[in-house]
Image (cartoon, rainbow, N blue to C red):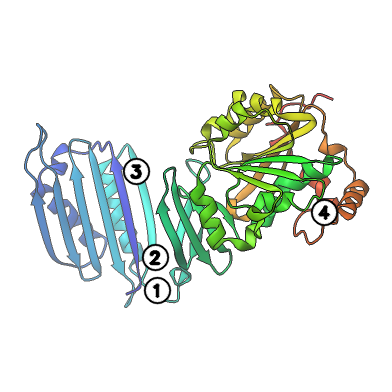
Amino acid sequence: MQGLHLTADLYQCACDPALLTDAALLAELCRGRTLDSGLTLVNEKWHTFPDFDGHPGGVTGALLLAESHLAIHTWPERGGITLDVYVCNFMADNSGKAEALLHGLVEVFQPGKAQYERLQRGDENGPGANGELLLESLNDTSAFGFRFARRLHAEQTPYQRLEILESKELGRCLRLDGLFMTSEADEFFYHEALVHPAALAHPAPAAALVIGGGDGGAIEELLKHPSLRDITLVELDQRVVDAARQYLPSIHKNAFDDPRVRLLFQDGARFMADTPRKFDLILLDLTDPETPAGPLYTREFFQLCQSALTADGALVMHLGAPFHEKDQVRDMSAKLASVFKQVHGYGLHIPLYGAYWALAVASDTLDPTALDAATVSQRLRERGIGGLQYYNEGVHAALFALPNFYRALMPAVKK
């Protein structure tokens, strides 16, 4: 049963319009291309839909092949066609014949735009044996993904789609609206980098604010700094915290219940507009700008954050992938620079995010790049911070050593 499944979604087709409405003409084309590709036709079925709303009806057809099938559907009112070719490779490898059939038909239909998918099926010892493949886009043309053996939880909260997945490599993983947020195996890359560069640069942070961060990983790292006696977590979606409590204790380590932590479930922008408090550190541990967190990526919101910082305080946030999201990183860092006197970009590869990832420390006075390795080592020792898996005295400076392509996206730091 092992085989290759190909699909094509075609738009703005410039072929003879009759191919989208005439079942006999379309059937003749599909039969001919099927035989030309070397596949074996054993039966077929075609149906023409009636006219609708002033438009001619489309055609649905299927060719049964000795090797499996070809299915086709047309939408003449949109100039659209969907193609589906599946071939079994049990007795012989028919993959090349499937490719020839699909692309031969696409060539005839002349689409203005096309989308393709390729799926290997039926190999119990193949890649699919390791679980469901889930992909995430980095931009319009790049994607990455992981295989997950189990879905532990899925729900539609009032704000987003929430999933808890599990794999051998990543352990349990939080996914929101189809975007990977954190996993048990690699959370330390992001959370240690988000928290410790700015927290170590501050001589004695006492109060911290985390907006977002419902998985609890950021507050767990903040609690390692003994001078921090007051940590506020503002999370829009309480169901994220609920799910983290149930499924991700290895990430938050019960930080939600520490007496130094206060949980608030409300909109981060509203909190910042209303709070009279001052914080030494503000961490924006947010979902991406195209999500419900979008209003928290504005210059106006950054101004609210600046007003809520102490004189030597700092804002920390992620900017995105500087190679794949150049415009976003450039735009976000420029907004920060229009509010803060210093914006220090830094970065690291984060496995779950599929790329080298950009973060920034924004402040009017705090400069994390001024911290040398000896001072970092001393402060880690004095604060009793051990057991870190990524961050150390050597890594601190390396985080801020930007490759040239990333440096070119960042505004000059005003010293």
Q: Position of residue 128 (x, y in %)?
A: 44, 68
The residue at which mark 3 appears reads as 114
> The disc labelled 4 sits on which kind of residue?
Asn
Circle nearer the viewer, 4 or 3: 4
Q: Quadrant of residue 328?
A: top right
- Number of numbered callouts drawn: 4
Mark 1 or mark 3, earlier in chain: 3
Q: Which mark is residue 120?
A: 2
Q: Report how far apart the C-alphas of labels 1 and 3 lie in the structure.
A: 28 Å
What residue is drawn where x is 6% and y is 42%? Answer: 50
In the figure, is residue 292 to the left or right of 249? Answer: left
Q: Earlier in the sequence, mark 4 or mark 3?
A: 3
Q: Secondary structure at mark 3?
A: strand
Q: CA distance from mark 4 to mark 2?
A: 43 Å
Instruction: Using the image, tell me which numbered label, if any, was put on residue 392.
Output: 4
Mark 1: give few (<14), some (14-19) or many (20+) Cα within 10 Å.
Answer: few
- Measure the alpha-carbon separation of dots 3 and 2: 20 Å
Secondary structure of the residue carrying tag 2 is: strand
Q: Quadrant of the N terminus?
A: bottom left
Structural distance between the alpha carbons of marks 4 and 3: 48 Å
